[in-house]
Amino acid sequence: MDVSAGLELGHVFHQFIGGVGLFNRSITIKQILKQYPSKRRTLDRFRPESFVKDAVLLDLTNMKPRQLIDDGDLEAAEEGAGLALREGEIALIHTGWDGNVGSEEYWSSHPALSENGADYLSFKRVSGVGVNMPSIDQPGNQALPAHTILMRNGICVLEHICNLDLIDQPRFRLIALPLRIKASVSPARALALLDDKT
């Protein structure tokens, strides 16, 4: 199964997914590097196996436009899937929002991860968080609180994931390979390796 995505590592000031750059102009690169010196590692410094991880699909298709996803929502999704997030896994948050791609609503009204939700995922010690939305943060929130919490804890962010509705397993292997470039943000080709049920 092919799952499109973009991958971010160690950034709280820039997203580059599918050719779209969104900059938080209130923060300078110099300020970010001073605040997060351990996050200077670029994609070319990671071994390929760093981007092959176990993943868990969390069904949050009940989220409404602009609704914040908090710890209670994430726990309910885990219970609904009959599992618990494990340390090192990637949490894929399936909101169904990719069905709005091509509309203004996709960018301006998507659900978002609350600070409480980001704290919960950090507590669970996941290695990554993926969403089928343009951002894990609320539209227009220049402070990027969810990004900041996750990145501060070394958690990668995958945004603009699509085709999560085609995955029929709660836990599987995810391959999300970014370009091997001297940058901390890249488009990525993501694949879900599903168990053969035949």
Image (cartoon, grey):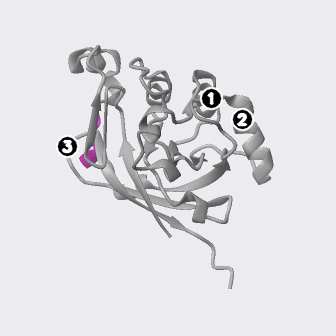
Q: Please report the residue visible at 35 percent of the width from the left and 57 percent of the height from the top.
A: 48
Q: Quadrant of the C terminus?
A: bottom right
Give, as a three-letter code, the residue at label 2: Asp
Sequence-wise, the earlier of marks 2 and 3 is 2
Q: Position of residue 74 (x, y in %)?
A: 69, 37
Q: Secondary structure at mark 2?
A: helix
Numbered range of the magenta stretch: 41-45
Q: Are marks 1 and 2 in contact (CB under 8 Å)?
A: yes
- Magenta stretch mostly in which secondary structure? helix
For label 3, the residue is 182
Q: Position of residue 168 (x, y in %)?
A: 66, 66
From the viewer's perspective, tell me whether residue 23 is left or right of residue 92: left
From the viewer's perspective, tell me whether residue 157 is left or right of residue 16: right
Q: Please report the residue visible at 30 percent of the width from the left and 49 percent of the height from the top.
A: 18
Classify 10 Å Cα crowding around label 2: few (below 14), some (14-19), many (20 and above): some
Q: Are marks 3 and 1 in contact (CB under 8 Å)?
A: no
Give, as a three-letter code, the residue at label 3: Lys
For label 2, the residue is 73
From the viewer's perspective, tell me whether residue 142 is left or right of residue 89: left
Q: Quadrant of residue 124?
A: top right
Q: Is residue 104 visible?
A: yes
Relative depth, front residue between 150 and 57: 57
Q: Secondary structure at mark 1?
A: helix
Q: Secondary structure at mark 3?
A: loop
As drawn, the label of residue 150 is none
Give, as a three-letter code, the residue at label 1: Gly
